[in-house]
Amino acid sequence: MILKPMLAAQANELPVGPRWTYEVKWDGYRALAIKDYSGVRLESRNQKDLTPDYPVIVSAVEAAKAPKFVLDGEIVALDHSGRPSFQALQHRRTSGMALAFYAFDVLAIGDESTIRKPLKARRQALRSLIAGSGLLLSDPLPGSPAHIEQEIRRLRLEGVVAKKDDSVYRPGERSDDWIKVRFSPQQEFVVGGYTPNASNFEGLVVGYYDQKKLKFAARVRSGFTPYSKAEIFRRIADRSVEKCPFVDLPNSESGGQWGEGITEAEMAKLRWVKPTVVVQVAFVEWTSAGLLRHPKCVGIREDKRVTDVVREDPGSKAE
């Protein structure tokens, strides 16, 4: 059975109503954990095999009692204070931090698909399935939406995913039955260029796709660790291209109010690369010019296709 993860719609506020439940939006890699008689496979949302990278999680999946199942969840790195850290996940081979798999759905048990069952029934089956395995359960959060938001903000977590408790699982679809709300704005962007320095780069030029055209979003100069800088540069250094991949550059004569634009003179100083690398970027807001204010690199996204990266415009409040 080939399945793709169900996706959540984006919103500015948590939906309210008796059918809604709320979970932590874990800051990690979305993955399916697949166990059958041939072994265990961890698969990213774009079907990349993650199994060799996470042996601890593979062992936890193997420890679950059922011989065959498919779980949906998030691979998360926990820092020294126990908080999820996407940057720590980037250092998984060197930092020795704790890795965990937070399971939040079950798509099949044995030869039976569970995707048409309501979420509350899937959660009940999931709890029994992973008990004692070392896999963690992403439990619904108690309290009102306002209280949940207050606590998530206090703990400095990324956000919340609201789910209707009677919703079925829609593989590969983005559904309004699941709503994600980020309390600190961030999303994925594609690297299309960089400002070089003596060793690697001073900053990245990033954007998103709109109608199959790459549009400029920001120059990102902060948030890099020595490891992330080296790893990003390793991935783009041999991807050089002569032509700027962004359809809307240059876009400024002065650099803009916050210096977010790129002038004709600055274009000559930049190095362009084939758009193959995706990074997660945190920012304050989208400006009226459609660019990012105060962008900061969070880390590399290995689980997202370049062509899937679009501008995430939060919709109105869900009913």
Image (cartoon, grey):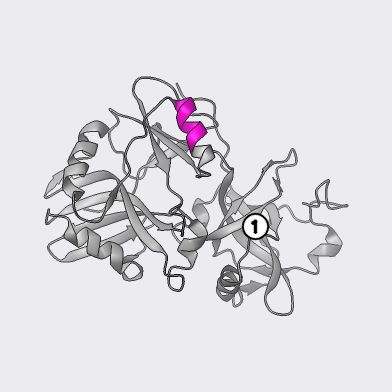
Query: Is residue 57 rendered to the left or right of residue 247?
Result: left
Give percent across and percent down for residue 258. 80, 48
Which residue is at a point 45% across and 27% down the rendered structure image? 145
Q: Is residue 146 magenta?
A: yes
Which residue shows up at 61% across the image and 58% down it? Answer: 297
User: Can the viewer see residue 27 in this picture?
Assistant: yes
Q: Secondary structure at mark 1?
A: strand
Question: How many dots with numbers?
Answer: 1
Residue drawn at 12 percent across, 53 percent down? 66
Q: Nearer the viewer, residue 214 or 191?
A: 191
Q: Main secondary structure of the magenta part?
A: helix
Side (left or right) of 256 relative to 103: right
Relative image position of residue 83 (x, y in whole percent): 46, 52
Dividing the picture into quarters, in which one does residue 190 lie?
A: bottom right
Check disc 1: other Cα within 10 Å, few if <14, some if 14-19, many if 20+. many
Q: Which residue is mark 1?
A: 206
Rendered position, 136 above or below 120: below
Whether the magenta-drawn stretch holds residue 34 is answered as no
Residue occupying image coordinates x 22% and y 59% = 61
**Amino acid found under the numbered disc labelled 1:** Val
Q: Which residues are magenta?
A: 145-151
Does residue 267 sit above or below 211 in this rendering? below
- Where's the C terminus, which quadrant? top left
Does the image show residue 10?
no
Query: What is the residue that sits farthest to the front in this orientation?
Result: 81
The x, y position of residue 301, in whole percent, is 50, 59
Q: Residue 53 at x, y = what percent?
A: 36, 69
Tell me: 318 left or right of 100. Answer: right
Q: Quadrant of residue 207?
A: bottom right
